[in-house]
Image (spheres, coloured by chain):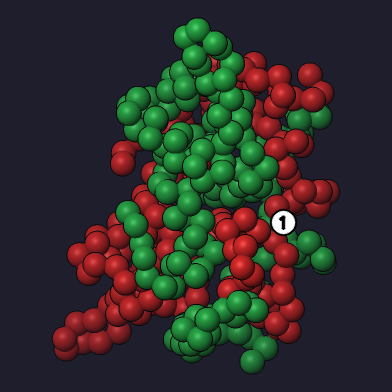
Chain colours: A green, B red
């Protein structure tokens, strides 16, 4: 999928979607966050076809999510090391995990997020860094940033106008 | 894509990926969070082919993310209303937005998350609900939950053992 509408290309969510490409990329990053670095480790964990895995690893490397490092000379073997850009993607996977556990594990949780220190289970919530209050659909909206094009400004206004139920409370 | 390895089917991130299906779904939810409810509103915002949009809306409805509501009798017209399950997905989109703005908007931000009340920009961060401390790759790990299968327990141990650089600090 290559979405190309201006609302996608200019939107940070759209760009994120373009960069991470498709769902295998999320799952490859998930395993990298758990320590996988080698082709065989990704392959074993995911049951993904080798040609698709190759393509996804190449794409993530080109996108600046992995640095390829040679760890064996003959034959040449590479491992995939997470960059800071990729490490900053961790909260997205954490948010997916929390949502999956809440809504898609009716039989109970198989995987739990926990503190590395003391193994205490963690309950992830997205808050504003300034006041630590949860960011929800009821409290947050999107507005034009300093680099918004005319088209994006128009779009943001028209989207807000659509549905009074989610329109800004303070307006 | 239909990933079917046990590491995917039993993992909350894998299940989330299966449920939301593919990237169009994320973008459809993004627009729904901004107030879009009608076919034409999604279609206009995304520049998505009508047959793909139909299929994605049907899938999201079957997955319990939308309830379809008739808003016009003749001809029959439906709108797609977000469920609580879908509203709980908002933090995932917020995390994608924050990451996109940080790493994919070198020219400056076009879209900014803001408080509905006072338009103050929000700086989303994922924290633990209990102590409000940020959850990062350095501080968090995954452990087996109460319903983890033998296979999942083995997998979690082997992933942790792979890479000392991300192994639990406290172990």
The answer to which quarter of the image holds residue B93 is bottom right
Please tell me which residue lies in front, A9 or B25: A9
Please tell me which residue lies in front, A17 or A125: A17
The percent coordinates of residue A119 (x first, y second) are: 75, 29
Compared to A50, does B113 lie above or below?
below
Whether residue B107 appears in this view of the structure is yes
Residue at the far left in the pictured view: B75
Q: Is residue A6 left or right of residue A141?
A: left
Compared to B142, does B70 lie above or below?
below
Please tell me which residue lies in front, A151 or A105: A151
Residue drawn at (72%, 70%) of the image: B122
Please tell me which residue lies in front, B96 or B157: B96
Q: Is residue A28 left or right of residue A48?
A: right
How crowded is the residue under tag 1: few (<14 C-alpha within 10 Å), some, or many (20+)? many
Compared to A38, does B97 lie above or below?
below
The percent coordinates of residue A63 (x first, y second) are: 51, 46
Question: Where, quadrant-wise, is the C terminus of chain A in this rendering?
Answer: bottom right
Residue drawn at (62%, 35%) of the image: A82
Q: Is residue B138 left or right of residue A66?
A: right
Which residue bears the numbered disc 1? B125
Q: Is residue B159 left or right of residue B167?
A: left
The percent coordinates of residue A38 (x first, y second) are: 52, 21
Residue at the far top in the pictured view: A74
Residue drawn at (61%, 84%) of the image: A168
Whether residue A111 appears in this view of the structure is no
The answer to which quarter of the image holds residue A80 is top right
The percent coordinates of residue B127 (x first, y second) are: 74, 51
Dot 1 lies on which element?
strand
């Amino acid at each position: 999928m290559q979405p190309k509408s201006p609302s996608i290309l200019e939107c940070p969510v759209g760009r994120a979607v373009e960069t991470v490409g498709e769902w295998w990329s999320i799952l490859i990053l998930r395993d990298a966050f758990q320590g996988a670095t080698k082709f065989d480790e990704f392959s074993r964990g995911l049951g993904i076809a080798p040609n698709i895995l190759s393509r996804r690893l190449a794409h993530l490397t080109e996108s600046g999510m992995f640095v390829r490092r040679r760890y064996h000379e003959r034959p040449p073997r590479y491992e995939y090391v997470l960059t800071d850009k990729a490490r900053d993607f961790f909260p997205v996977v954490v948010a997916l995990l929390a949502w999956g556990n809440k809504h898609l594990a009716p039989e109970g949780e198989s995987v739990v997020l926990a503190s590395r220190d003391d193994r205490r289970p963690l309950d992830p919530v997205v808050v504003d860094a300034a006041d630590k209050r949860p960011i929800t659909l009821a409290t947050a909206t999107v507005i034009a940033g300093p680099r918004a094009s005319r088209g994006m400004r128009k779009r943001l206004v028209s989207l807000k106008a659509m549905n009074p139920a989610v329109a800004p409370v303070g307006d």
